[in-house]
Image (cartoon, rainbow, N blue to C red):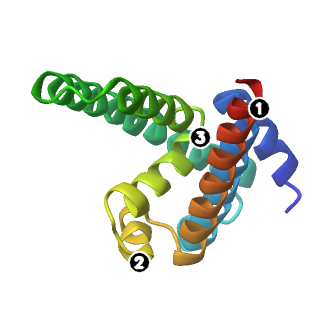
């Protein structure tokens, strides 16, 4: 537990997003506990946990980049196949804008549960997290989306 503040600082440096950083720290701790048998006594625990955090961040960055490429490709294909009405296009554009303001972990969780209609168990298995963590992420994502849409509606 003494390493948590240092892990959080490093995660915030990497992610540049407090929510994403906190998720990274949580995932790092969970993975470190799950792989505790792989830690060699006498080696540097701080370096080991920082390596886990860094690898998680890089994995998420790669996944996010690939996710964006797929979404861009899908969006370009969808636009050419059927042109929605102007209000529908605006709503889709707004949703897309708000979704990309969420952290990658929250966005991924919401898309798996909401758009892909997976169960929490299936989504947790895909993301290699507990069902409780998946439910928390989806709840946070929904709350943040609601706040974003209400803030945008208040400005309009």
Disc on the earlier residue, 2 or 1: 2
Q: Are marks 2 and 1 in contact (CB under 8 Å)?
A: no
Q: Which mark is residue 121?
A: 2
Q: Which residue is mark 1?
A: 154
Q: Tell which circle, 3 or 1, labels the residue nearer the N-terminal end.
A: 3
Count of numbered tags: 3
Residue at position x 30%, y 32% from top? Answer: 71
Q: Closer to us: mark 3 or mark 1?
A: 1
Distance from the alpha carbon under mark 3 to that under mark 2: 21 Å
| Residue situated in front as seen by the camera: 64 or 113 | 113
In the rendering, at what x and y percent does residue 138 appear?
56, 61
Q: Is residue 9 above or below residue 124?
A: above
Residue 45 at x, y percent in the picture = 72, 55
What residue lies at 30% left-to-right and 28% top-to-bottom? 85
For the point 52% across and 41% down, the residue is: 104
The residue that label 3 is drawn on is: 103
Left or right of 90 on screen, residue 84: left
User: Which tag is nearer the camera, tag 2 or tag 1?
Assistant: 1
* Left or right of 72 on screen, residue 112: right
């Amino acid at each position: 537990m003494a390493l948590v503040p240092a892990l959080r600082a490093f995660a915030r440096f990497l992610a540049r997003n407090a929510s994403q950083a906190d998720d990274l720290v949580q995932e790092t701790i969970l993975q470190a506990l799950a792989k505790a048998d792989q830690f060699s006594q006498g080696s540097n625990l701080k370096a080991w946990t920082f390596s886990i955090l860094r690898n998680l961040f890089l994995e998420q960055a790669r996944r996010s980049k690939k996710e964006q490429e797929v979404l861009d490709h899908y969006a370009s294909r969808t636009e050419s196949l059927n042109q929605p009405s102007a209000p529908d296009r605006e709503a889709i554009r707004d949703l897309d804008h708000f979704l990309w303001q969420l952290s990658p972990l929250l966005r991924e969780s919401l898309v798996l549960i909401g758009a892909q209609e997976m169960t929490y168990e299936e989504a947790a298995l895909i993301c290699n997290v507990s069902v409780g963590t998946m439910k928390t992420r989806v709840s946070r994502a929904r709350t943040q989306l609601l706040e974003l849409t209400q803030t945008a509606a208040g400005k309009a």
